[in-house]
Image: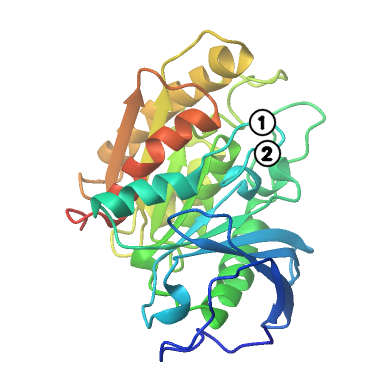
Amino acid sequence: MGDSGAGGSCDGSGEPLPAAPTPFTLGGQQAWAHDEGFASGYFHTYDALDVGGAGARKVHVFLPRDYGSSCVQYPVVYMNDGDTTFWPGSVGKTWDVAARLAELYAEGAIPQVIVVAVHPLARDREYTHAEFAPNRVCCGVSSYADYLADRVKGFIDANYRTRREREVTAIVGSSHGGLGAFLVGALRSESFGLVGSLSPSFWVGLDAVHGGAYTGGALASSALLDLTGAALGNPAMRPRVWIDWGLVRSGGFHNAEIEAAATTRGQEMVTLLGASFGYGAGELAWNEDPQGEHDELSWSRRFPEVMKFFYGTSSP
């Protein structure tokens, strides 16, 4: 496979499903095509995508199985913490997005999508806007938002058959990645019109979840709202938003402290978006999961509902 042009062929003679891992070059970037047997698609994996701005990083592009033989343009879902999107990461758990998509497609619940799973280089820095713990890096989300919108999305749109409109382009994440998704969607709302924030770290800069001299305060007067308020207050350009949290508090620090803070601040954000910014039912969805923990298994279980809110037949 050589360097192919944007979108590939639409005459039925496009890229075949890879029978074995196959290296290729696309848009000047080296990658390899591989089929892991998922019913919902196959992969183009860039082990060192280097499109400027933040250094080379691994990115998985998950394509529908008929991508190579169709003329369809697909919505794109960008995923933070791309190392756990399809396979277990360092924590040993995964969102298992390929399996969740297969279930959604079998139900006819959503159209097929392209998923772009972006590995972080330094997630504390890339997904946050304020200091949140002693001796932890922070505060690079504005640069990350520009990198994702201008560089990564630019590369994907130039080289794959995508629907480029903001209204069908999603950014999804959990925990710090959920905070990052919310910030990316607000800071670059002309590119990302759909935001999925699962168990998001809206407490960053406010609450001493990881120690430090943080004394709380209201989200309404926080650095988070200072950054996002203008976008959230613009009905013509603000993103549609999904926010959720889990209620399990046993099982260790992640549930007892981190998910507890995600719950408190998530509830506060839902109220704030409705009461202060006028978000209505078609723009905002939230979910409180009685079995929800602060882990990939819980986020995987809720992922289908996020996709239905974004792309389901009853979506705006």
**Front residue of this view, candidates 69 and 258:** 69
Image spot of residue 178 (x, y percent): 52, 41
Tell me what residue is drawn at x 46 percent, y 37 percent: 300
- How crowded pointer 1 is (Cα within 10 Å; few <14, some 14-19, many 20+) is rated as few
The answer to which image quadrant residue 305 occupies is: top left
Q: Which residue is mark 2?
A: 89
Q: Is 129 left, or right, of 162 in this rendering?
A: right
Q: Is residue 36 above or below residue 76?
A: above
Q: Is residue 244 above or below residue 71?
A: above
Q: Is 291 left, or right, of 143 in this rendering?
A: left
Marks 2 and 1, Cα distance to the nearest angstrom? 5 Å
Q: Are marks 2 and 1 in contact (CB under 8 Å)?
A: yes
Image spot of residue 241 (x, y percent): 36, 47
Image spot of residue 183 (x, y percent): 52, 50
**Front residue of this view, candidates 213 and 39:** 39
The answer to whether any part of residue 32 appears in the image is yes
Tell me what residue is drawn at x 29 percent, y 40 percent: 285
Total marks drawn? Answer: 2
Image spot of residue 308 (x, y percent): 28, 49
Tag of residue 92: 1
Question: Which image quarter holds the C terminus?
Answer: bottom left
Q: Secondary structure at mark 2?
A: loop
Q: Amino acid at mark 2?
A: Gly
The answer to which image quadrant residue 54 occupies is: bottom right
